[in-house]
Image (tube, helix red, strand yellow):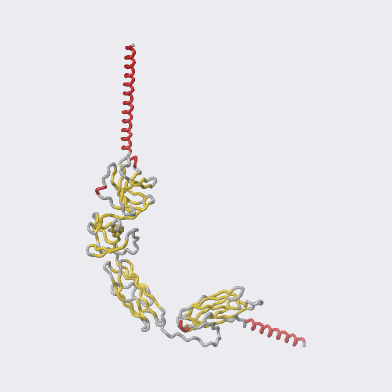
Amino acid sequence: MKNRKRVTVIAVTAIFGLLMRVSAWAVGFGLSASSGSVAPNGTFTVTISGARGLFQITTENGSAPASTMCGMSGGCSFQVTAGSAGTTRVTVSPIDAATSSTTPEEVNESRSVSVAITSPNNNTTGSRPSGNTQKPAETDHRSTNNALASLGVSKGTLQPAFSPEVTEYKISLPSDATEIEVDAQAADAKASVSGIGKKALKAGDNVLEIICTAENQTTKTYRIIVHVDEKPLVFVKYQGKKLGFVRNVDDVSIPSGFTAKTISVNGESVSAWEREEPKQTLVYLVDDDNHKDFYLYDEKEGVTSLYRPIQLGGRNFVMIDVPKKLQKQSGLTYQRFTLEEMSFYGWKYENQALENYYVLYLMDGKGNAAFYQYEASEQTLQLYNGNVATQEQLSEEQTRGDQAMLWCYGTAGVAGVLLLALGGFVYYVKKGKK
């Protein structure tokens, strides 16, 4: 009898424990979506409630984080991106989670929520947890195919060869290319293509965009980067050098006071800039070594001078060519030298005692050219009027001054002797009369 009672108690205890275990396994959590439907490729928020811990996230026809962690207070949210059509289904499975109640219980059961993908005009709001009997929104059956079936150009060769999955290409064209025609066909008859036809080209890189729009209005952009050789097409000669007009001046920093214009050189239109006071025209040229500079240009004389904006002695100037008639200056030697890491043609004093001094011919920002004297040790600059004395000049002036003083002293001495002689003569005359 006692054995029967003992067996009965053990059996009842085991059954009760099993029932309690089943109850623990059945513990779940809340799962909801911020919207019952979204537009193609739209986003919505999924919220976990009543639980805390680590959860695994699985998404069908969409994308979301692989996992999420809910804090001790219970509950958390994450964002989901829907697919292009149909329904996006999100399943959340506990990895190490429990309820957020006063007496936490282990959470084992997975939950799912589904969101319909509809056109923007048919979106509905509200959550759609698993098991919801609400009728799903109507599915968008429009085509999502936004790929091209072909892409071609009238000049050059696409690199790489066309493929619907490749969206960026390059083409190289010679310097005389001024336009190109682009042709493309959509893979889906219900899709549309824009960005085709004739396109004007400039020297350098030209970015052409061809956009394919699917029936459901999603797009795919294909890019063609057309590089046109920047070699000049128009040339001029200056000081024995062949200079070409730079064709692509979009990124050139134009000196203050000048406005853009177009001039004709050798029957071709080229870019230039001008200002009214003083009347000056600038052009941007490149030499055989690919050195680019502004130059002053006259329609009758052609290029007349270099025009290079610089900063010297803390001030803004323009380096210009020194006219031949000004290159010979008394007491100065015309030569090339470097100041503040810039190369100049100018003058140095013949007197070695003035080796830190230089004379330059510069233009200010208003277009006025003048001589300036530069002192290298202090990097100071001032107007040069041609009267700055050399040491020889100072010595000569000192000699002339000394001679003048000697003449004064000599004259005064002679006058003194004459006065003394005159005084003595008067004295003896008066004494003889007595």
Q: Position of residue 151 (x, y in %)?
A: 33, 77
Q: Quadrant of the N terminus?
A: bottom right
Q: Position of residue 429 (x, y in %)?
A: 32, 14
State the residue in front, 11 or 315.
315
Q: Quadrant of residue 275?
A: bottom left
View extreme (front): residue: 434
Q: Quadrant of the C terminus?
A: top left
State the residue in front, 386 or 240.
386
View extreme (right): residue: 1
Q: Position of residue 354 (x, y in %)?
A: 34, 41
Residue shown at 53% from the left, 87% from the top: 134
Would you say residue 152 is visible in this rendering?
Answer: no
Instruction: Classify 353 as above or below 323.
Output: above
Instruction: Classify 172 as above or below 34.
Output: above
Residue shown at 60% from the left, 77% from the top: 51
Would you say residue 236 is visible in this rendering?
Answer: yes
**Horizontal placement of 124 versus 186: left or right?**
right
Q: Position of residue 334 (x, y in %)?
A: 28, 46
Q: Could you tell me how many numbered marks the image carries?
A: 0
Q: Quadrant of residue 353?
A: top left
